[in-house]
Amino acid sequence: MRYFSIEEDKSLGYTGFVNARHKWLLPGMDTCPACKAIWADTSKAYPSVDLTPLAAGADFEEARAEPIEEYERMRELVRPLLPPGAVVEPGSCFGPLVGNAQGRFGQFVSNYSYLLLVRREALEKLQAEGLRGLKGCRMEVRFRQRNSPELLELEILPVGRAHPDCLPPDRKPPCPRCGRLGLSLPKELLLDMSTLPTDLDLFRLEDFSTVLVCTERFVEACQRLGLDGITFLPLPTVG
């Protein structure tokens, strides 16, 4: 099986842009007591997760940094609501995208590297092809135009990791307390074949979660159906 990264295709001249953020999020980390890092990562997003049942739901609406004890308390409140396979970190997001949009859109929209939106009819075609793990979630986005498309956000689980051969040999292990990896995305990314899922045709890497990965089955289906808006770059694998 071959794998590809997904990026926005800017060659087609689409002008569509979605200016939105998820309804809820975990706080960022305000100085981990172990690694001393102040950090957050919003690329792990779960738009299907509804936090309205939580009595403290309003606490998740404001982007901010908190001490690790408060972050861990809020993380445990969310954990029972997560889909199987979910991984959360400081800054992880939940619920629908809320905001506005305008312009001319393709079948896929990837204004932000870690998000992938799709027209409902395109998603239905891909699901009819038998592609695995494609879950579209509604958005609360207002279009500033008539005849606007119905866009859904794909919920993309973090699975799979980079191969050690493309990482610095002197790298430190993830922080044992907050989990921060502290590495930049390698210029020449290699996938660790032994960590890749066998039941998903679309996923994001767990350790570099801004990287969206798809199988050749996904690529071939998109090309056969004429679905545009994104482009595919081969990713080598090891192991």
Image: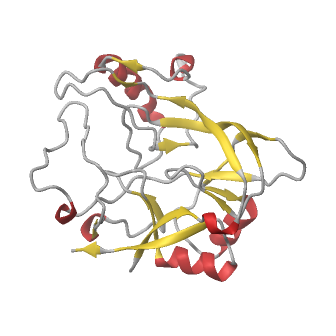
Q: Residue at x 21, y 74 (%)?
A: 239
Q: Residue at x 55, y 21 (%)?
A: 57
Q: Quadrant of residue 226?
A: bottom right
- On the rendered structure, is 192 left or right of 124? left
Q: Quadrant of residue 79?
A: top left
- Which residue is more in the foreground, 221 or 57? 221
- Which residue is more in the foreground, 156 or 64? 64
Tally of marks: 0
Q: Looking at the picture, how far across and down is residue 11, in whole percent?
A: 63, 68
Q: Looking at the picture, how far across and down is residue 227, in whole percent?
A: 67, 72
Q: Residue at x 59, y 36 (%)?
A: 95
Q: Looking at the picture, how far across and down is residue 16, in whole percent?
A: 72, 53
Task: Give the position of the N terminus as an image quadrant.
Answer: bottom left
- On the rendered structure, is 235 left or right of 37? right
Against 80, residue 17 (above or below) is below
- On the rendered structure, is 46 left or right of 180? right
Q: Looking at the picture, how far across and down is residue 92, in whole percent?
A: 44, 36
Q: Residue at x 41, y 46 (%)?
A: 86
The scheme the figure's colours follow is: secondary structure
Q: Residue furthest right?
A: 146
Against 194, residue 143 (above or below) is above
